[in-house]
Amino acid sequence: MTFDDGKVMKQSKGLATKDHYTIDVTNQYSGKILERERISLELMANAHPTSKTRLVDAGCAKGKLLIEIWNRFGIKGIGLEYSKTFLAEARTAGVDARFCDLHAGIPLEDATVDILNASEVIEHLYDPDFFLREANRVLAKGGSLVISTPNLCAWFNRILLLFGIQPLFLESSTEDRSIGAGPLRKMKKSTQVVGHVRILHVTALKDLLERHGFEVKEIHGTVFENELPAPASWIDRLMTIRTGLSALLVVRAVKKRELVKQK
């Protein structure tokens, strides 16, 4: 697997890419493995990895998941990361982390990856179709794409809409995440924008993957960990029984066909 570290990174369609993560390092980047990450690891295990499996973590942050992958599977994966701060910390931790702007593409050769993981990434991309075309290109046939992302149709979002309150995960401002939150504004732990631009639900996620040459093999729902008020947490856990009502979605899809390259 060859990484083109010298490739010129260009902004896709002139859209600027902002690093939303350097300022506010939240608990999701601590040493704890979150439930969505645990499920992602289980889905990777279902792809039957070996020590020779070529694995890439797109949006690897500090490299926590890659360290866990090494401990569990004995795989020395590659991390791709846009945040220069996280990139430095991942490298300090011994992770093979490389700078990458996913809006410009995945700088890897065709069919050189067996498992591509993208945890909480696709919702930050202006052009998810481009990302999935790139994922299809770099994955070997039969390779697995593992994605986790917020669910637009989560149970609490359905309730919020009934009361005219903007659903969680959506951001109407580039400066203040509490815009549109109405009476829930005071409950926000932080008003820092995290850069969500595409929030999907189960059908949209499946349709996107199938459009770009993937077959969905597994899809699971999980909780909005450490974010909801305590009284709502048990309801959130209960709602994972129905994937479509879950707070977050985790999916494994397999590359079934090559895409016609766009000129």
Image (cartoon, helix red, strand yellow):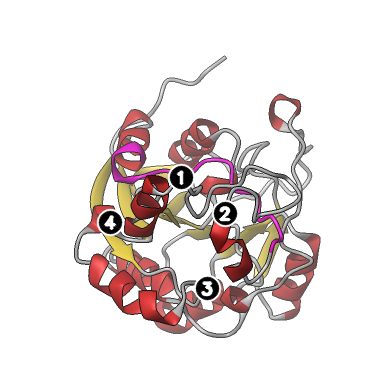
Characterize the local packing of mark 4: few (<14), some (14-19) or many (20 or more) Cα atoms within 10 angstroms.
many
Count neighbours of disc 2 (C-alpha within 10 A) and say few if under 14, some if 14 to 19, many if 20 or more: few
* Cα gap from disc 2 to disc 1, whole angstroms: 8 Å
Foreground label between 4 and 2: 2
Q: Are marks 3 and 4 in contact (CB under 8 Å)?
A: no
Nearer-N-terminus badge (1/4): 1
Q: Extreme top residue here?
A: 263
Name the foreground residue: 228 vs 111: 228
Q: CA distance from mark 1 to mark 4?
A: 19 Å
Residue at the image point whose x is 49% and y is 77% from the top? 226
Q: CA–CA distance between discs 4 and 2? A: 22 Å
Q: Which residue occupies the extreme left position in the image? A: 241
Q: Could you tell me if the residues under marks 2 and 1 are in contact, i.e. CB atoms within 8 Å? A: yes
Counting residues from the start of the chain, the first of labels 3 and 1 encountered is 3
Eye-nearest disc, 3 or 2: 2
| Label 1 residue SS | loop
- The segment highlighted magenta reads 191-204
Q: Which residue is mark 1?
A: 164
Q: Amino acid at mark 1?
A: Gly
- Circle 4 residue: 245
* Residue wearing tag 2: 182
Q: Marks 3 and 4, how far apart in space?
A: 26 Å
Q: Secondary structure at mark 4?
A: helix
Where residue 29 sits in the image (x, y, percent)? 61, 75
Q: Which residue is mark 3?
A: 65
**Residue 64 visible:** yes
